[in-house]
Image (cartoon, helix red, strand yellow):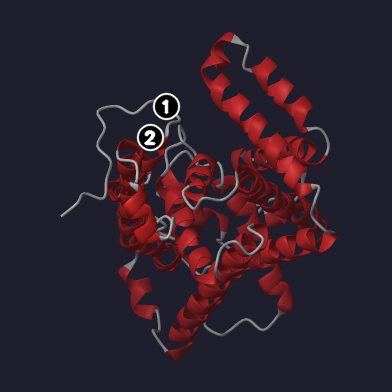
Amino acid sequence: MESTELKPDKPLPGTKEEVLQSIRISKIILPILLGVAAVLYLAWRQFNPEELSKVSWSGRVLQGILLAFFLLLIRHLAYAARLRILSQGDFSWRKCIELIFIWEFSAAVSPTSVGGSAVAFFVLAQEKLPAARTATIVLYTIILDTLFFILSIPILLSFFGLSMIRPDLHSLTELDAWGTTFFLAYFFMFLYGFVFFYGLFINPVQIKRLLFKITNLRFLKRFRKKAILTGTEMILASFEMRKQHWSFHLKAFAATIVAWSGRFLLLAVLIAAFKSDWPSSPSWYMGLYARLEAMFVIIAFSPTPGGSGFVEVLFGGFLTDYVANNTNSILIATIWRLMTYYLYLLAGAIVIPNWIREVLNYRKQLSKKKKSPISPTQNLQTGGKSQNNYN
């Protein structure tokens, strides 16, 4: 059987081989170990068998889990819809759904040295999109995701105040380490979101020059090639974006809102299912939604793959006023991560091998064609058409 993994001795940084290695199925081991270790640690420190015995695994809990699965499906389809919009219909719905599985898996296991964006560029490039279209999809996706948080966080803060960050936080003088981290993370989001927006819609050439100057610094020189590549991709994407109608942007942002809202509402539904009674107040759900969004701003800068281990530890401290006790917190966090993180690791383990095999087979076929030119007789037999399209 042909291997589904590339095995060069030591790929050069930023090469296609490095990216392919970064999404190998073996990469799921580390995040799983980190997540399991965090759950076991929390169970050892905080688990209470008496509280577990009080949990009623009634129809309400099962309904909550089923509703959460439905919201997971909505989230995935919203991401697929956004990809279809940004690809301008070049991808079928089936292909978009498949690529979102790969994208989510890659984001969950990719090391920071490669990054989710690098993987996304590579994955889309294998689908033979024009370079400008590939750059547009990845860079505009970053802008759309960042814009969602930049716009929604101030709105939520105006309604719920600083308590949306932590349950006991009421003024800036009470900011703890988590509150400070939240504002620093939001500022960083705003900063790089502005840079990408300026580069994509206003002056991409200036951004490329800026990236080149920044990477002239001695300790940043190793990032110069990637910075120049990003600048070039931004110029290509900017040219592509100027051709788009306003409805293109509106539909893409609407899909982004649905996808992110589904992500937070999914967890809100799970938390509500473990309450003694379903909360009926809309303000309860909105307050919880705001807290979850604040929590994710911090999780987004987690040093571990997909936030594994970090999320489980962070979960309980942020939601003490919404979750009855630590035991419930561990249960809900585990179910949530199984549904939204480990499920994508499992799906990736199914989808990725076949996708990589197609990529490798396609490359081998191209290599054979270059070494062995098609004879006139063969060309007549095939009608002059390539037989190597694996899409």
Residue 373 x/y as whole percent: 34, 41
Q: Residue at x 30, y 40 (%)?
A: 372
Q: As drawn, is 72 to the left or to the right of 38? A: right
In this rendering, does residue 16 appear at all? yes
Amino acid bearing label 1? Pro
Q: Say which residue label 2 marks.
A: 18
The residues tagged by marks 2 and 1 sit, at their Cα atoms, a distance apart of: 6 Å
Q: Residue at x 38, y 57 (%)?
A: 380
Q: Position of residue 234 (x, y in %)?
A: 69, 36
Residue type highlighted by circle 2: Glu
- Give the image location of residue 92, x and y in percent: 55, 68
Q: Quadrant of the N terminus?
A: bottom left
Q: In the picture shown, does residue 381 fall above or below 371? A: below
Which residue is painted at 30% across and 44% down in the image?
Answer: 364
Can the viewer see residue 267?
A: no
Q: Is residue 215 above or below residue 305?
A: above
* Residue bearing the label numbered 1: 13
Label 2–label 1 contact, CB within 8 A = yes
Q: Position of residue 178 (x, y in %)?
A: 60, 43
Quadrant assignment, res 378? bottom left
SS at badge 2: helix
Mark count: 2
Above or below residue 225? Residue 298 is: below
Q: Residue furthest bottom?
A: 59
Residue extending farthest to the top is 218
Q: Check disc 1 and report its element: helix, strand or loop.
A: loop
Lower sequence index among marks 2 and 1: 1
**Left or right: 10 as drawn, with respect to 271:** left
Taking the view exactly as shown, the residue that stands out farthest to the left is 1
